[in-house]
Amino acid sequence: MKKIIVALDEMDYEQAISLAQKLKEAEVIFKINDLLDDRDGPSIIWKIKHFGDVMADPKFHDIPNTVKNRVKKYVGFKPDFITVHASGGVAMMRAAVENCEESKILAVTVLTSLFLKP
């Protein structure tokens, strides 16, 4: 069965939880971007996880050691997926994969926002 990714972008905590509760039976993947994560902390991942799979979408892009440490922090909240930016290089992506435990690492190659016109 294919799953649909539902972006919880531009939502506050209450809106995100409300939508996740409504879609609990739909077997979707909830995408939590850095806006929601920055406001409410990565614990929002664990809370949304009660309603379905979660893709944490911070798009980490830094030196390998920093990405390793950030991934270690995130895996404690049990996201199914964590994104990194592929332009960070092979060493950075390896550091993420080596520390992802049960989460899967998704490498983002191109940001769609780069192609949106203002």
Image (spheres, grey):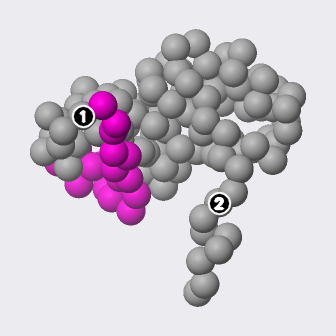
Tag 2: Cα neighbours inside 10 Å, few (<14), some, or many (≥20)? few
Where, quadrant-wise, is the N terminus in this rendering?
A: top left
Q: Is residue 69 among what the camera can see? A: no
Position of 116 relative to 81 (above/below): below
Is 72 in front, or is 20? 20
Position of 58 relative to 76 (above/below): below
Is 6 in front, or is 56? 6
Bounds of the magenta segment? 1-18
Three-letter code, disc 2: Leu
Residue 41 - label: none
Q: Is residue 43 within the magenta segment?
A: no
Q: To which quarter of the image does residue 40 belong?
A: top left
Q: Describe the element under mark 2 as helix, strand or loop.
A: loop
- How many numbered discs, if any? 2
Q: Is residue 14 within the magenta segment?
A: yes
Q: Which mark is first along the chain, 2 or 1?
A: 1
Q: Which residue is drawn at 66% across and 46% down?
A: 108
| Residue to which mark 1 is pinned | 27
Q: Residue at x 23, y 54 (%)?
A: 15
Where, quadrant-wise, is the C terminus in this rendering?
A: bottom right
Q: Describe the element under mark 1 as helix, strand or loop.
A: loop
Position of 34 relative to 106 (above/below): below
Report whether 5 appears left or right of 110: left
| Residue to which mark 2 is pinned | 111
Report whether 46 appears left or right of 80: left
Mark 1–mark 2 Cα distance, whole angstroms, equals 26 Å
The x and y percentages for residue 5 are: 37, 46
